[in-house]
Each structure stands twice: as C-alpha cells, then as structure tokens.
Image (tube, helix red, strand yellow):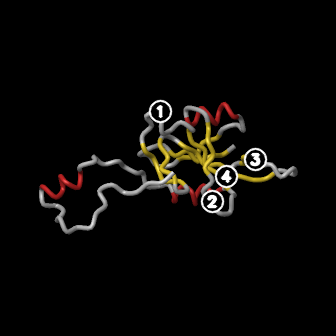
Amino acid sequence: MKILVVEPEKKPYVREISDDIHEMQEVVDGLIEPIRFEPENDAIAFCNEEFLFNGSRPNRLVGGVMVHGTFFVVGNAFNEYGEEISVPLTDEQIEKYSEKFESPMYVLPENLCGILREIGVLDYDDDIDEEPEMSM
C-alpha cells in the first residue's frame, strides 16, 4: 500500500507498506490514531495516539490538530459493507498531500520575540502573538 510519510522537520516521502496494523504502528512508533482532515474523506492521516505524552517533536498542523512525531497519509474508502478501509494513495493524492505538508514546522524558542525586539529586528509596535492559540 502506497502511503505518504511526514516526519518532523523533513519533506514528505512515499513509502510502500502492507495493509497490516503492526506495520502502520511501526511507521508512527506506537499505537495509531486516525485524524480526519479532508472534507471529501478520501484520505486519512494516522499518528501516534500518545504524541502529546511521549516527547515527540511538533510536526505539522493536520485538520486543526498540531501533530507531534511522524504521521502518514493513506487513502480512505468504504467496502461493500460500508466499513472504512485504508487504500493506497493515488498519484494525484501523493502530489496534493506532498504539497500540503511540504513545509516543515519549526519550533522557535519561547522568548524569540523578546530577543528579536532586544536586538532591534522587531519593534514593540509589531503585531505578533507571542503565544498563538492552539486547539485540539
């Protein structure tokens, strides 16, 4: 099954895995948790369900959730019984999600704005949220 792997601070890459829960868990280094992020529901992301507790580094914003650690994107479909199943990504989906998750997110020191103001790069009048709101 063709998936798109997204690691912290790296560009996404394609990987082939079997449709096996253990191999999916190996990709994220733990138990998997789905994140629905597409209105069409034709793809789904899977991350480590304990990413907030296991010391993983911040990665990307996926469906309004700041995911930490490695996650992957796989195609999503429904079988004849109406059950969701994972399917390989199409070439178009790989291109779409590679672009969507292309830019790594970097975490800057908490006091960066203060440092930049101190050295004159930012003015105190600059409108910068030092602590952006994040929701889960």
Tag of residue 46: none
Inspect the image, locate mark 1, and give the three-letter code of the amino acid beneath it. Asn
Inspect the image, locate mark 4, and give the three-letter code of the amino acid beneath it. Leu
* In this rendering, position of residue 11 left or right of residue 118: right
Instruction: For marks 1 and 3, give the one nearer the viewer.
Output: 1
Mark 4 surroundings: few (<14), some (14-19) or many (≥20) residues within 10 A: many
| Disc with the residue nearer the chain's start (1 vs 2) | 2
- The span from disc 2 to disc 3 (Cα, nearest Å) is 15 Å
Tag of residue 54: 1
Instruction: For marks 3 and 4, give the one nearer the viewer.
Output: 3
Inspect the image, locate mark 2, and give the three-letter code of the amino acid beneath it. Glu
Where is residue 93, by image quadrant? bottom right
Instruction: For marks 1 and 2, give the one nearer the viewer.
Output: 1
Mark 1 surroundings: few (<14), some (14-19) or many (≥20) residues within 10 A: few
Tag of residue 89: 4
Inspect the image, locate mark 3, and give the three-letter code of the amino acid beneath it. Ile
Which residue is more in the foreground, 81 or 92? Answer: 81
Position in image of residue 111 (x %, y %): 23, 49
Position in image of residue 77 (x %, y %): 75, 53
The residue pinned by badge 2 equals 38
| Disc with the residue nearer the chain's start (1 vs 3) | 1
The residue pinned by badge 3 equals 85
Residue located at (55% from left, 32% from top): 29
Q: How many labels, in total?
A: 4
- Residues under numbered marks 1 and 3 in contact, where contact means CB atoms less than 8 Å apart: no
- The span from disc 3 to disc 4 (Cα, nearest Å) is 12 Å
Instruction: For marks 2 and 4, give the one nearer the viewer.
Output: 2
Residue located at (64% from left, 36% from top): 24
